[in-house]
Image: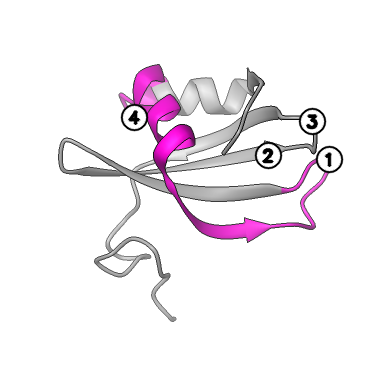
């Protein structure tokens, strides 16, 4: 993902601290992560869910962006095995 500027929502900062996720881990996910899901209809900006592994730990980061490279970190979490298949790229079906 190509971000010229990066903004952090209050929610994302709260989740980072609560879940012990570093800024470096989030930046690595944004720069090198794989797109798991696209959210083209999200408002005010379309978003996408990214996956990246850090020292054996999977990390999901939701980032919204515009066409000019302005990005917003929406949330961050370690995916749960109860909701995601082992690859953390596909949701489990109910």
In the image, what residue occupies the spot 36% across and 20% down?
A: 24
- Asked whether the beta carbons under mark 2 and mark 4 sit within 8 Å of each other, the answer is no
- Asked whether the beta carbons under mark 2 and mark 3 sit within 8 Å of each other, the answer is no
In the image, what residue occupies the spot 35% across and 51% down?
A: 79
Give the SS element for disc 3. Answer: loop
Of the numbered discs in the image, which one, if any, rests on residue 68? 3
Point out the image quarter for the C terminus: bottom left
Mark 3 vs mark 1: in front: 3
Instruction: Kindly identify which residue carries mark 4.
Output: 19
Of the numbered discs in the image, which one, if any, rests on residue 4? none
Give the SS element for disc 1. Answer: loop
Instruction: Kindly identify which residue carries mark 1.
Output: 44
Mark 2 vs mark 3: in front: 3
* Left or right relative to 92: residue 8: right
The magenta segment: 17-46
- Name the residue nearer the viewer: 32 or 88: 32
Of the numbered discs in the image, which one, if any, rests on residue 64? 2
Mark 4 vs mark 3: in front: 3
Q: Quadrant of residue 75?
A: top right
């Amino acid at each position: 993902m190509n971000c010229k500027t990066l903004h952090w929502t209050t929610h994302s900062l709260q989740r980072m601290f609560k879940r012990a996720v570093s800024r470096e881990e989030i930046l690595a996910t944004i720069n090198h992560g794989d797109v798991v899901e696209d959210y083209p209809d999200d408002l005010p900006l379309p978003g996408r869910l990214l996956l990246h592994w850090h020292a054996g730990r999977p990390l999901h980061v939701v980032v919204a962006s515009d066409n000019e490279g302005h990005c917003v970190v929406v949330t961050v979490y370690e995916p749960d095995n109860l909701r995601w298949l082992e690859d953390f790229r596909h949701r489990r079906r109910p």
